Image (tube, rainbow, N blue to C red):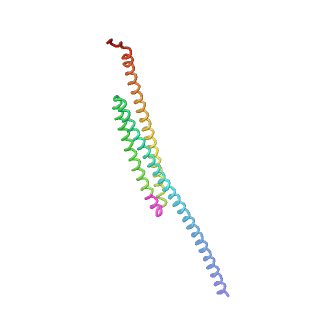
Amino acid sequence: MEDAQARADAAGAAQAAAEAVAREAEQRAEQAAARAELVEAEREQATARADAAERERERAREQAREREAACQAAVQETQRAGERAEQAEARAAAAEQRAEEARQAARDAEDRADRAEQHARSERAALECRVGEQRDALKAAELDARTALEQEQRRRAQLEADLAAARRRLEAAEKARDASTAPREQAARRAPRRKR
């Protein structure tokens, strides 16, 4: 009788232990599923950030092409100004130098965009094995991209201001030339003609 009771007690304890193990295994499975969902969500976020970096690179290239076109237009304008007035030749050379600097700045911006894209791709690949470490690296990359974009906007604004100043100086030179030639023409008209 006592043996049967002991076996019953042992069976009950074994069943309770098995149920506890089953509950623990279920909890671990739920935790693993939650971690898997978190990793998938972070991977999707990294993919979205990489796509945003690609779009930013395309915008930087478009801005570089626009600056190149603006520089070419500035060069043509300075050439025409040199034909109209010899006094504006030095100013046209300075404008050409600024245009060359702007082209170099555009090439530098494209190089930075390429480096940013390569960095984003490497971060995306590394994220698949190290999600935690990649999060900080992506934040740093986004800060660099914003800084580079702000610098490019400031450079573009400076270039536009320089071009506008060059045009104003050219217009002033033309007005000064016209003002200097007008008295001579008036004097020529007022001078008495010789009698034949």
Quarter holding residue 6: bottom right
Residue 125 is a magenta residue: yes
Residue 144 in the image: x percent, y percent?
A: 45, 49
Residue 178 in the image: x percent, y percent?
A: 40, 24
Q: Write the start and end of the magenta stretch as one range.
A: 121-130
From the viewer's perspective, tell me whether residue 89 is left or right of residue 121.
Answer: left
Please tell me which residue is depicted at 37% across the width and 22% down the height of the picture. Answer: 181
Query: Residue pushed farthest bottom?
Result: 1
Query: In the rendered image, is residue 140 in sight?
Result: no
Residue 109 in the image: x percent, y percent?
A: 41, 47
Query: In the rendered image, is residue 141 in sight?
Result: yes
Please tell me which residue is depicted at 43% across the width and 30% down the height of the picture. Answer: 168
Q: Toward the viewer: 1 or 57?
A: 57
Residue 85 is a magenta residue: no
Q: Say if 20 sits above or below 139 in the image.
A: below
Quarter holding residue 21: bottom right
Name the dominant secondary structure of the magenta segment: helix
From the viewer's perspective, tell me whether residue 2 is left or right of residue 83.
Answer: right
Q: Toward the viewer: 2 or 129?
A: 129
